[in-house]
Amino acid sequence: MFTEVLGLVAVGVAAGVVSTVVSLASIVSYPALLAFGLPPLTANVTNTIALLFTGMGAAAGSRPELVGQGPLIRRLGVATALGGAVGAALLLVTPARAFEVIAPWLIAAASLLLLLREPRPGQAGLGGENGRPLRAAVFGVSIYTGYFGAAGGIIMLAVLATALDRSLARVNAVKNVVAAFANAVAAVGFAFFGPVDWGAVAPLGAGFLLGGRLGPMIVRRMPGQSLRILAAVCGLAVAAKLGYDAYQS
């Protein structure tokens, strides 16, 4: 039992760092929960609740990058919370097969957008940070994140990087915080109606908190466009793996 607790903490730390740097926490933590013997739905909802602690750690670790971005985060937070609620509700009442089929294409498209569209000062798509298209896109990504989740952070990062005229480190900080809104709403629903393994939430969440705190420190020290390229390459790898799994079955 003690060994399992330590293992979950270690998984949480690794996943928290991966989440805040390349937006792929669930690729680390979800398979680990399955390996610890949790059924798929239980692993999914347990992971979502524990992910709340990544957002807390990331907010604490990203304070320099978040300065002056409060109004934007509040606006986008509403859209992500609503989308997360819709996605969580869908997860509890429908099978995940539809998202399993389309997820690889969504992730691949977002990764290519990150890889090929190098941000240029003064250029902002989706109507800019105050545009309705940005809030609509964030809402849609949050539905996906609340429902299926795999590499949802990369899709969100690609959307935000397209619309926001600021450094990728500051965009990534916004992504980490607003993603917590979607997770928070989904977590509330799962806490009441989902098969949560609370014994796994505590150690995994503790690891997520520490990993989420460490991740922004790493991002801050990454040179040039390395964050954009690393996130895109990881996203393409995940898209290939999920596509193989989905279309082989």
Image (cartoon, rainbow, N blue to C red):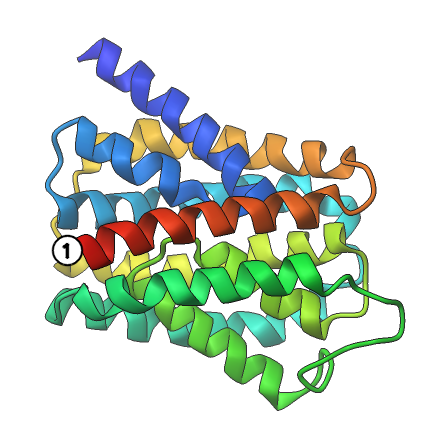
Q: Quadrant of residue 9?
A: top left
* 109 lies above or below 229: below
Tell me which residue sits at (43%, 53%) in the image: 151
Quadrant, the N terminus: top left
**In this orientation, which residue lies closer to the viewer: 135 or 156?**
156
* 65 lies above or below 138: above
Decide if residue 52 is in sight here.
Answer: yes
Tell me the residue that label 1 is attached to: 194
x then y, percent, for residue 141: 45, 70
Q: In which quarter of the image is residue 67?
A: bottom right
Residue type pointed to by label 1? Gly
Number of numbered discs: 1
* 238 lies above or below 154: above
Tell me which residue sits at (13%, 55%) in the image: 249
- For this view, does 209 lie left or right of residue 218? left
x then y, percent, for residue 181: 47, 62
Tell me which residue sits at (37%, 44%) in the image: 26
**What residue occupies the far right of the structure in this picture?**
121
x then y, percent, for residue 135: 56, 81
Q: How crowded is mark 1: few (under 14 residues within 10 Å), some or many (20 or more)?
A: some
Decide if residue 66 is in sight here.
Answer: no
**In this orientation, which residue lies closer to the viewer: 14 or 119?**
119
Tell me which residue sits at (72%, 65%) in the image: 117
**SS under mark 1:** loop
x then y, percent, for residue 48: 32, 50
